[in-house]
Image (spheres, rainbow, N blue to C red):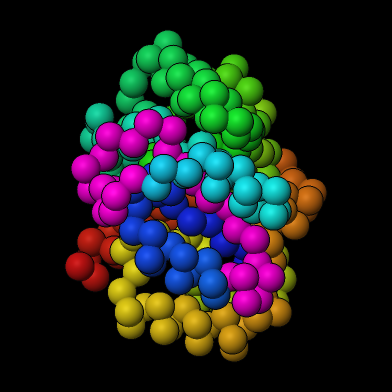
């Protein structure tokens, strides 16, 4: 299975030491990830370091190097207790809000990115949670791709192209066919985890691809049945994670 990489919670005040340490691993193997940039971060939990003054210039530099940018919500502040269409978590910045409110948040986020010279049509929902209004508002706001869902290749549902994430990374590394995404929160990486990542990339180098290559994979159509099964898997993983904790 070919595995792309996405890095969540990219902000001017993230933990830069951890981010750059992980970037060094990716650079070593020529892997260019998807990065989820928060347009107007107001989540206190993401304040890890001093603001990097050249943040937006740096993001644009990464784009020129082949890194792919997604808009990661708007302020990354959870406003509801809804899991939405992909209930990995029971909290959301978007799911449960009315269409007009979601559309305004999406347009405001896109405007901030454009003011800094960053353009994208890919959306990364905070906490993986979104609903039908989110998808409708995203399409109206010029977004046509989302990094979420489960499956072995990109798929189209309700006019949106979804690029699935891994249900269980250890299983994805064993599979021979298909495509998926490994989700990484660099702010949360421990020293032990960093060593594990280094070992994993060294042992499975041929399994990883750049996100730009993932975007080239032809999507398939997915109907209601496939989405219902995906929702079931998300609920199951939510329960498993709670039990593990």
Query: Which stretch did the figure color magenta?
Result: 26-51
**Image height of 149 relative to 72, above or below:** below
Name the foreground residue: 186 vs 102: 186
Residue 5 place in picture, x, y as percent: 57, 62
**Considering the image in quadrants, where does the N terminus appear?**
bottom right
**Considering the image in quadrants, where does the C terminus appear?**
bottom left
Left/right placement of residue 186 relative to residue 22 reads left
**Is the magenta region chiefly helix, strand or loop?**
loop
The residue drawn where x is 42% and y is 21% is 105
The residue drawn where x is 50% and y is 87% is 199
Q: Quadrant of residue 192?
A: bottom left
**Image height of 144 relative to 89, above or below:** above
Residue 90 place in picture, x, y as percent: 27, 43
**Image height of 182 relative to 196, above or below:** above
Q: Magenta stretch: residue 36 in it? A: yes
Residue 189 place in picture, x, y as percent: 34, 69
How many discs mark residues in the rendered view?
0
Residue 142 place in picture, x, y as percent: 63, 23
From this viewpoint, which residue is outermost toward the front? 53
Left/right placement of residue 85 relative to residue 3 reads left
Q: Does the image show residue 174?
A: no
């Amino acid at each position: 299975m070919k595995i792309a990489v996405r890095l969540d919670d990219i902000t001017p005040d993230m933990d830069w030491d951890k981010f750059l340490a992980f970037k060094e691993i990716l650079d070593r193997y020529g892997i260019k990830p998807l990065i989820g940039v928060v347009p107007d971060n107001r989540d206190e939990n993401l304040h890890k370091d001093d603001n990097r003054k050249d943040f937006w210039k740096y993001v644009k530099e990464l784009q020129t190097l082949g890194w792919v940018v997604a808009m990661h919500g708007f302020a990354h502040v959870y406003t509801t207790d809804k899991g939405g269409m992909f209930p990995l978590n029971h909290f959301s910045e978007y799911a449960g809000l009315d269409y007009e409110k979601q559309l305004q948040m999406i347009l405001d986020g896109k405007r901030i990115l454009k003011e800094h010279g960053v353009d994208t049509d890919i959306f990364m929902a905070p906490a993986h949670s979104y609903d039908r209004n989110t998808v409708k508002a995203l399409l109206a706001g010029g977004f046509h791709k989302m990094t979420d869902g489960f499956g072995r290749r990109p798929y189209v549902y309700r006019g949106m192209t979804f690029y699935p994430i891994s249900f269980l990374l250890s299983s994805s590394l064993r599979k021979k066919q298909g495509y998926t995404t490994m989700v990484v929160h660099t702010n949360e990486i421990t020293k032990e985890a960093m060593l594990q990542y280094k070992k994993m990339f060294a042992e499975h180098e041929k399994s990883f691809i750049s996100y730009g290559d993932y975007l080239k994979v032809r999507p398939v159509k997915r109907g209601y049945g496939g989405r219902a099964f995906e929702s079931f898997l998300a609920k199951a993983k939510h329960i498993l994670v709670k039990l593990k904790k």
